[in-house]
Image (cartoon, grey):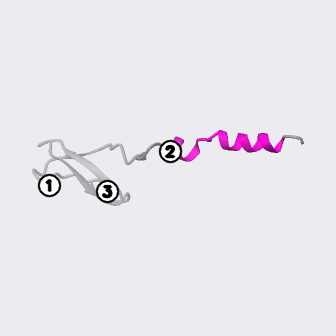
Amino acid sequence: MPTYDYKCLDCGNTFEYFQSINDEPLSVCPNCKGALKRLIGTGAGPIFKGSGFYQTDYKDNGGSSKSSNSTSNKKD
């Protein structure tokens, strides 16, 4: 279930509310009973932590695979 951001159009109060996607949006401010507007959030994007995904997971080391190929192609 997502968390939605709301802002009161009367008093300016902003808050988050945890509710189902199927629930109707809130319409009454809990502070002043004024009209609410549901804000469009950015959502949760991917979080990249560490030394770098490309360098640690996908980067070809180059030297190890090339050296094994060159020794196997030699003729005696």
**In the image, residue 61 lies in the stretch drawn in magenta:** yes
Left or right? Give the position of 32 relative to 1. Answer: left
Quadrant where the N terminus sits is bottom left
Query: Residue 58's quadrant in the figure?
Result: top right
Circle 1 sits on which residue?
30
Q: Amino acid at mark 1?
A: Pro
**In the image, residue 70 lies in the stretch drawn in magenta:** yes
Q: Which mark is in front, 2 or 1?
A: 2
Task: Indicate the secondary structure of the residue bearing disc 2.
Answer: helix
Vertical position of residue 36 compared to residue 2: above or below: above
Circle 3 sits on which residue?
24
Disc 1 and disc 3: Cα gap in Å? 16 Å
Could you tell me residue 59's position as x and y percent? 58, 41
Left or right? Give the position of 40 relative to 76. Answer: left
Q: Which mark is in front, 1 or 3?
A: 1
Left or right? Give the position of 10 relative to 62. Answer: left
Task: Indicate the secondary structure of the residue bearing disc 3.
Answer: loop
**Do tag 1 and tag 3 residues touch (Cβ < 8 Å)?**
no
Q: Earlier in the sequence, mark 2 or mark 1?
A: 1
Q: Which mark is in front, 2 or 3?
A: 2
| Magenta span | 54-73
Circle 2 sits on which residue?
53
